[in-house]
Amino acid sequence: MDAQAVAVNPVTNKIYVAGGNVTVIDGATNDTTLVPAGADPRVVALNPVTNKIYVANIGSDNVTVIDGITTTRRSCLRTQAQSQ
């Protein structure tokens, strides 16, 4: 799947790319780690203070929360679909 969104943590020098899953790139070494996300991840936001990464999954109406220290999926938060 193509990359849908990118976020950079300037504190840790890690790059987060959403597209199918989330690819975490270590900016110092270019090593990559794949973190599972929900269906159709489209938006990535991060908090450099808490080192938490938030990925909005459009296809599953939830937000994947990634721990930036361990590079693992910590939780998946449900969102409510907006009625049309």
Image (tube, helix red, strand yellow):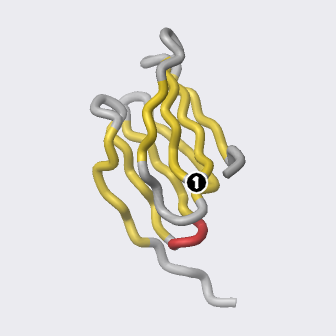
**Category of crowding for the residue at label 1, using alpha-carbon neighbours closer than 10 angstroms: few (below 14), some (14–19), many (at least 20):** some
Q: Position of residue 19 (x, y in %)?
A: 62, 49
Report the side of 5 relative to 48 (left or right): right
Dot 1 lies on which element? loop
Residue drawn where x is 51% and y is 52% of the image: 55
Q: Position of residue 8 (x, y in %)?
A: 57, 28
Rendering quarter of residue 20: bottom right
Q: Residue furthest bottom?
A: 84
* Front residue of 17 and 46: 17
Point out the image quarter for the C terminus.
bottom right
- Residue 59 position (above or below residue 9): below
- Residue 62 position (above or below residue 21): below
Residue drawn where x is 54% and y is 43% of the image: 45
* Front residue of 80 and 72: 72
Rendering quarter of residue 48: top left
* Front residue of 17 and 55: 17
Q: Position of residue 27 (x, y in %)?
A: 53, 16
Pointer 1 residue: 20
Residue drawn where x is 49% and y is 78% of the image: 80
Residue drawn where x is 42% and y is 44% of the image: 35
- Residue type (three-letter) at the residue carrying disc 1: Gly
- Residue 84 position (above or below residue 31): below
